[in-house]
Image (tube, rainbow, N blue to C red):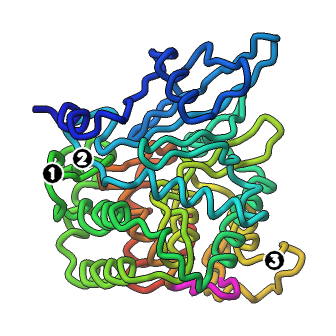
């Protein structure tokens, strides 16, 4: 019996939704009380989603009123491959994350509004931003606007500071935290379970020949890293830290695929399905890693880090970054108050490795050797807690 068939047999009350079945979506939304008087779902369109079903729903009143919303359903398998298990309960955890953020006005201003949620069916109804697009275009040469960078950093600061020391265990998400641990600290090194046993959305890491096809010498560098005892020890220790940390609420997957650019240039952060208690430095380091992968200018990186620290660029002292800066090279390892710059660098390092040689690779543009150079940077970040931009 397939994973889907087993789920449907065990949970007959849960309708598995599809953008191709607007009538079923209308039925479910009506049953949940999410439709207004004389309002019905007239159309649905897919918004993609790898590990969840995400769609835009169009709702129209008989009298002519019209609106749209985003409907998201999380199920315990991967959308593109139902043989791959995903942690149960992640939809419930994501709903609780949105509900918590709604109580934090500054953080909430950078996320979609939660319009409805049903834990039993793992369904969320969210504010829709028509005309928006994710920021994966950053990997292809687009430069992030400094106001957008500031908005992203401000979201993290508000989220972390507002939840630091909170004791609400309802917001724990152990299944997704465990999956994140496998994706970051095991899978890139060949230690994670096979795909069918729940490796998750990334899939297996590439072997040496496949990596060399991406970039000459990358496979050799990856094999050397995977057999580097000092590096592997540092990765394992950081993985233990990651599993045990509970300082504040973190987004858990803070990267351009979850950053929305609105038509007016503002940004929103979406998809907190990995949201869980952890280190603030984990989110900051993850975001920093992706800005480096996207080869963003120094001023963009500094704006992001300053906003994450709660300071504007004008408030920074010239020497307050906590960095050694080589002549002619822009430093990016900022040391904002309340954040450990070495810990943020180490988290950035493991995220770089995941995206360079793990299963969750991102498309990169640039000179030959950029991936190998970034891999060397990642090693320094993890082992020494030091990170700087490479000029290629």
Q: What residue did someone put label 3 on? A: 311
Q: Is residue 202 visible?
A: yes
For residue 340: magenta? Answer: yes
**In the figure, residue 70 lies in which quadrant?**
top right
> SS of the residue at dot 1?
helix
> SS of the residue at dot 3?
loop
Residue at the (36%, 62%) spot, across then down:
180
Residue at the (53%, 30%) spot, across then down:
31
Indicate the position of residue 82 as horizontal and vertical percent values: 24, 35
Residue at the (50%, 68%) spot, across then down:
171
Q: Is residue 317 left or right of residue 170?
A: right
88 vs 383, nearest the viewer: 88
User: Measured along the vertical axis of the image, is residue 283 above or below residue 33?
Assistant: below
Other-residue count near label 1 (Cα within 10 Å), few / some / many at <14 / 14–19 / ≥20 = few
Other-residue count near label 2 (Cα within 10 Å), few / some / many at <14 / 14–19 / ≥20 = many
Q: Disc 3 and disc 2: Cα gap in Å?
A: 42 Å
Q: Residue furthest right?
A: 314
Disc assigned to residue 85:
2
Question: Which of labels 3 and 2 is toward the front?
Answer: 2
Other-residue count near label 3 (Cα within 10 Å), few / some / many at <14 / 14–19 / ≥20 = some
226 vs 44, nearest the viewer: 44
Q: Earlier in the sequence, mark 3 or mark 1?
A: 1
Q: Earlier in the sequence, mark 1 or mark 2?
A: 2
Question: Which of labels 3 and 1 is toward the front?
Answer: 1
Q: Disc 3 and disc 1: Cα gap in Å?
A: 45 Å
Helix, strand or loop: magenta stretch: loop
Q: Are marks 1 and 2 in contact (CB under 8 Å)?
A: yes
Q: What residue did someone put label 1 on? A: 197
Q: Disc 1 and disc 2: Cα gap in Å?
A: 7 Å
The magenta-colored residue range is: 335-342
Q: Earlier in the sequence, mark 3 or mark 2?
A: 2
For residue 312: magenta? Answer: no
């Amino acid at each position: 019996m397939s994973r889907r068939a087993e789920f449907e047999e065990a949970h007959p009350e849960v309708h598995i939704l599809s953008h191709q079945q607007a009538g079923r979506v209308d039925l479910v939304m009506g049953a949940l009380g999410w439709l207004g008087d004389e309002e019905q779902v007239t159309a649905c369109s897919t918004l993609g989603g790898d590990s969840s079903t995400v769609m835009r729903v169009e709702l129209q009143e008989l009298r002519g009123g019209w609106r749209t919303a985003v409907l998201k359903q999380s199920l315990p398998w991967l959308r593109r491959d139902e043989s791959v298990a995903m942690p149960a309960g992640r939809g419930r955890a994501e709903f609780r994350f949105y509900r918590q953020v709604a109580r934090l006005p500054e953080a909430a201003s950078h996320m979609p509004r939660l319009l409805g949620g049903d834990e039993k069916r793992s369904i969320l109804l969210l504010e829709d931003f028509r005309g928006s697009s994710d920021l994966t275009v950053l990997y292809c040469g687009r430069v992030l606007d400094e106001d957008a960078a500031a908005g992203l950093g401000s979201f993290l600061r508000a989220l972390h500071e507002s939840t630091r020391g909170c004791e609400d265990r309802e917001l724990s998400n152990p299944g997704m935290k465990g999956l994140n641990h496998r994706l970051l600290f095991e899978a890139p090194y060949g230690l994670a379970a096979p795909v069918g046993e729940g490796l998750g959305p990334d899939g297996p890491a590439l072997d040496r020949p496949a990596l060399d096809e991406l970039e000459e010498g990358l496979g050799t560098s990856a094999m050397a890293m995977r057999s580097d005892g000092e590096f592997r020890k540092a990765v394992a220790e950081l993985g233990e830290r990651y599993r045990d940390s509970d300082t504040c609420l973190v987004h858990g997957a803070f990267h351009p695929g979850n950053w929305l650019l609105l038509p007016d240039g503002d940004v929103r952060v979406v998809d907190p399905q990995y949201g869980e208690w952890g280190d603030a430095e984990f989110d900051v380091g993850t975001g920093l890693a992706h800005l480096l992968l996207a080869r963003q200018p120094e001023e963009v990186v500094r704006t992001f880090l300053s906003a994450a620290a709660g300071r504007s660029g004008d408030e920074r002292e010239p020497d307050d970054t906590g960095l050694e800066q080589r002549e002619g090279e822009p430093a990016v390892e900022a040391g904002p108050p309340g954040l450990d710059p070495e810990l943020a660098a180490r988290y950035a390092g493991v995220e770089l490795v995941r995206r360079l040689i793990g299963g969750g690779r991102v498309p990169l543009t640039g000179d030959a050797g950029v991936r190998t150079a970034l891999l060397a940077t990642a090693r320094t970040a993890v082992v020494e807690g030091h990170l700087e931009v490479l000029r290629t």
